[in-house]
C-alpha cells in the first residue's frame, strides 16, 4: 500500500509527491531535517525535535515554513493516515526553489521554504536484535564541515562512513578528530569506565542529540555518574563498555571498536539499564 506523505500543505500518495529540480536541498544540500520515532502510535521526544529544528533554521538564517506551528498535527495525521504503530517520521525543510540555480540565497519574501514529511514503518522498533548482541564499529577520520551541531541534509560523508563499516564487516563507524572521538555516523558516542558514563561535551563538533539529552538526564536521575568531556580512541578501546544513542536506535550497546573487544564482548550493564529506562520513561511521556 502506498504511503501518504506531506508536501507543502498537501497530503498525497507517495508516487504523486513532487519537489522542484531547482529545490536548494537538491542542488546545494541547503536544508535541515529531523527524525521523530513513533512507538505504539505515539511520538517520542517530539518537543525536543521541534526545538532543535527551530534552532537549525535560525542558525542557517532559513525561514520557518508556514506550517511550523501545525507540525504536531501534521505528524499525528501522518501516523493516522498510514496506520503507523512503530517507526519514524522524517521531516525536511529546505530554503525552497527560486526556479534556477544560484549560490546566493533567494529572497525569503519571494521564495518560501519547502516542507516535506513522510513515515517509515519499523515494526518492533524497540526490540532491535542489535540491542541484545551489541554492535561492532570502526574508526574513521572526521572530515565533515565545522557546524555539525546543525542537523543539515549534508549526509554524504556519514553515508560513506556507514559503507566503510559495512565493507569491514562491522555495523557503524565512530569519527575521530585529532585523536578524539566526536560521534557516530548518525548517533552520539559514549564509553563507560568503572561505572562512569563519558561522552563528548556539547559544541559545534557534534550534533546536540535529543536522545542524548534525555538519556543523560535519566542517567543522572538514576544516580549514575556522568562526565561530559572529550575521550580518545585509545581510551575508548580500553573502556569497560560503550554505546550510542539516536532517535531511531535509542540506546545501542557497542561491543567492539576496530577489532578490540570491549569488556566481555557482550552488551554491558550500564547500556542495558539506560536503554530500559529510556524506553520506559519515553513511552510514559510520548504524545
Image: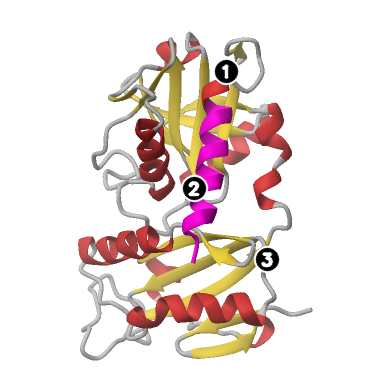
Which residue lies at the image location 44% right of the left edge and 57% below the top edge? 45
**Image coordinates for residue 145, horizontal then vertical, percent:** 31, 45
Kind of element beneath mark 3: loop
**Image coordinates for residue 214, horizontal then vertical, percent:** 39, 45
Query: In front: 206, or 26?
Result: 206
Q: In the rendered structure, which disc, 1 or 3, sits on the residue that comes first in sequence?
A: 3
Q: Which residues are magenta?
A: 271-287
Q: In the rendered structure, which disc, 2 or 3, sits on the residue that comes first in sequence?
A: 3
Mark 1 vs mark 2, CA separation in Å? 33 Å
Q: Residues within 10 Å of mark 3 (few under 14, many from 20)?
A: some
Disc 2 and disc 3 in contact, CB within 8 angstroms: no
Q: Quadrant of residue 61?
A: bottom left
Query: In front: 72, or 187?
Result: 72
Which residue lies at the image location 64% right of the left edge and 33% below the top edge? 171
Q: Decide if residue 219 is on the left or right side of residue 257.
A: left
Please indicate, yes or no, whether residue 253 appears anywhere in the rendered image. yes
Query: In front: 72, or 259?
Result: 72
Q: Decide if residue 217 is on the left or right side of residue 21.
A: left
Disc 1 and disc 3 in contact, CB within 8 angstroms: no
Looking at the rendered structure, which numbered label has been put on residue 258? Answer: 1
Residue 261 to residue 220: above or below: above
Q: Which residue is mark 3?
A: 85
Amino acid at each position: 500500500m502506498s504511503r501518504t506523505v506531506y508536501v507543502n500543505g498537501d497530503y498525497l500518495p507517495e508516487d504523486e509527491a513532487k519537489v522542484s529540480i531547482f529545490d536548494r536541498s537538491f542542488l546545494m544540500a541547503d536544508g535541515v531535517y529531523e527524525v521523530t520515532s513513533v512507538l505504539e502510535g505515539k511520538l517520542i521526544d517530539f518537543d525536543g525535535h521541534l526545538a532543535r529544528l527551530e534552532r537549525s533554521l535560525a542558525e542557517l538564517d532559513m525561514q520557518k515554513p508556514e506550517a511550523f506551528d501545525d507540525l504536531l498535527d501534521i505528524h499525528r495525521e501522518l501516523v493516522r493516515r498510514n496506520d503507523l504503530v512503530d517507526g519514524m517520521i522524517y521531516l525536511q525543510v529546505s530554503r525552497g526553489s527560486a526556479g534556477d540555480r544560484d549560490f546566493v540565497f533567494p529572497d525569503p519574501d519571494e521564495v518560501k521554504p519547502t516542507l516535506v514529511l513522510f513515515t517509515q514503518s519499523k515494526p518492533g522498533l524497540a526490540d532491535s536484535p542489535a540491542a541484545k548482541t551489541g554492535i561492532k564499529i570502526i574508526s574513521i577520520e572526521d572530515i565533515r564541515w565545522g557546524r555539525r551541531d546543525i542537523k543539515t541534509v549534508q549526509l554524504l560523508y556519514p553515508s560513506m562512513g556507514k559503507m566503510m563499516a559495512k565493507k569491514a564487516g562491522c555495523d557503524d563507524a565512530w569519527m575521530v578528530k585529532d585523536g578524539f572521538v566526536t560521534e557516530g555516523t548518525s548517533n552520539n558516542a559514549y564509553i563507560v569506565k568503572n561505572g562512569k558514563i563519558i561522552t563528548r561535551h556539547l559544541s559545534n563538533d557534534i550534533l546536540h542529540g535529543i536522545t542524548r539529552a534525555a538519556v543523560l538526564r535519566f542517567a543522572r536521575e538514576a544516580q549514575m555518574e556522568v562526565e561530559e568531556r572529550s575521550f580518545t580512541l585509545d581510551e575508548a578501546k580500553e573502556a569497560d563498555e560503550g554505546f550510542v544513542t539516536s532517535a531511531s536506535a535509542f540506546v545501542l550497546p557497542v561491543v567492539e571498536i576496530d577489532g578490540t573487544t570491549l569488556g566481555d564482548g557482550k552488551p554491558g550493564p550500564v547500556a542495558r539499564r539506560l536503554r530500559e529506562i529510556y524506553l520506559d520513561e519515553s513511552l510514559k511521556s510520548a504524545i
